[in-house]
Image (spheres, rainbow, N blue to C red):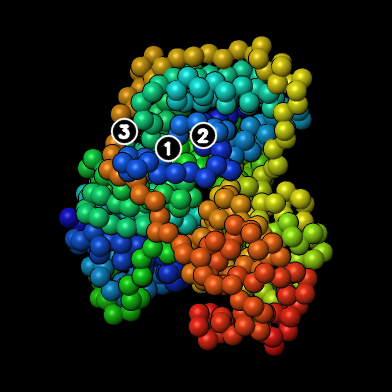
Amino acid sequence: MTILVIAEHDNNTVKPATLVNVAAAQAIGGDIEMLVAGGNCAAAGEAASKIVGVSKVIVADNDVYAHQLAENIADLIVELGTGYTHIIGSTTASGKNFMPRAAALLDVAQISDISGVVSEDTFERPIYAGNAIATVQSSDSIKVITVRGTAFDGVAAEGGTASIEACDIVKDSGLSTWIKEDIVALERPELTAASTIVSGGRGMQNGENFKLLESVADKLGAAIGASRAAVDAGFVPNDMQVGQTGKIVAPDLYIAVGISGAIQHLAGMKDSKVIVAINKDADAPIFQVADYGLVADLFTAVPEFDELLG
Amino acid sequence: MKVLVTAKRVVDYNVSIRVLSDNSGVDLNNVKMSVNPFDEIAIEEAVRLKEAGTAEEVVVVSVGPTACQEQIRTALALGADRGILIETDEELQPLGIAKVLKAVIDKEAPQLVITGKQAIDGDNSQTGQMLAALTGMPQATFASKIDLSETEATVIREVDGGLETITVKLPAVVTTDLRLNEPRYASLPNIMKAKKKPIDIMTPADLGVDVTPRVKTLKVNPPAERQAGIVVESVEQLVDKLKNEAKVI
């Protein structure tokens, strides 16, 4: 068995998701090779060769791959991928973009977002926003897989000695063009990457009151989220929504403020390590999943909490 | 231009799903079913294109059992012009659905295909990308804004940490993210009108498509239960617990 891991990188460094992919590949077992496709990506290829557990790094360095356009990357994976038993990518915006395209071109299914490896052809994955875990078995000759970033502990980024092989295959579909990127220099971490999240619900009463949460979030280095009720009420924009139809998050600490805990919200945050609920309704369902509940009026509790954080 | 959109029939997002006691799947009996919320955003976007005069016709497709007609009717009530149901009781997986949709596209030749970025049942996020692959179209996934010209679409995509702008040549497949729009509610007159709009019904076999699943679901388990913790008496105690017990602040 030889596994091809697709590196997630920014042309200079490999991202942590790559280390998680290698950990999943090790759980499957077999020889592990890695593809670094990018533009001016020699540094990323170099970094990839140091990852523990990787035997060979294939570097496809060409402008056509610089922005990870799905059409070009998928065609490259298809051409390289036929000799492998497994092709593993990340459940990230870019992995989710090109991996299914590659799978369809190979005429195989994709197993998305695996959270566990049972055997070389059997995997666990969350469905219904994590409200059920399915164990699925693939009958395809090549298993195309994406890996949930929080499901495996990444391997060490340093210590490996993989060989580096240049790949000169150029795939340019000419169908899509990258124009620009607006990576927001966020004052706060992004919701899906944050280790702490402070979320507000309908109990916040209006958008203005979210300022109370901002101060707490600044002190904790936290992202700010919201329930669908708060979004539907127009307090905050859609992209702050945590829940089944919003962002699915699993931070170390999730603080739910004025959130009752509708099913659709719980589906998006119940895998958080520690959940805190602040709500004046002692019967709110959020308390059934909270590690620490505080039955209190948020308009007195949150400022007090803020002050105690110093 | 003609725009084709999808309407997958899924368990309503407000339903608390229950895993069957024999672990064969989730209980779908007497459960409220709806249009996949991300498909609703796709339908809304197509209808807005029609209202703006950019699209002449909006065709909505669903793949699945007879009951999917309900979801097609919903889309028709929101403003789609006609529906196509590819009827089958087989278990459907993204690759099979993409093959069916490709066959529909071969007949319909839309300039733009808009699908949800994922369905909230299987959470696969594959069908749009696979459809683009099979039809040889470019793809713009996780779209938060679409601008169309005669020959191409400029799409702002949600990527990790921000936004990315790409252009794709038409015809193309676009998949929707949350910020693209906020879907309307169907009005009663439009619900009545939708009943008269046509729905074509055919089977995967009529289209010459094999939808046999490639992946077998061996079992479905509920996730590890989360135990309710403790109720603290004061903010002070809460901060103390978070600092010294949970060690998260």
Residue beneath the point at 74% across and 60% down: A203
Residue at label 1? Answer: B27
Question: Dot 1: within a 10 Å radius of its alpha carbon, few (fewer than 14), some, or many (20 or more) residues?
Answer: some
Residue at label 2? Answer: B31
Q: Are marks 1 and 2 in contact (CB under 8 Å)?
A: yes
Position of A247 relative to A150 (above/below): above
Percent across and percent down for residue A5 are: 32, 59
Q: How many marks?
A: 3
Q: Are marks 3 and 2 in contact (CB under 8 Å)?
A: no
Residue at label 3? Answer: B213
Residue A122 falls left or right of residue A72: left
Q: Give the mark, 3 or 1, whose residue is nearer the N terminus.
A: 1
Specify the amino acid type for callout 3.
Pro
Using the image as rendered, state which of residue B202 and residue B51 is in the foreground: B202
Residue A196 falls left or right of residue A56: right
Q: Is residue A65 visible?
A: no
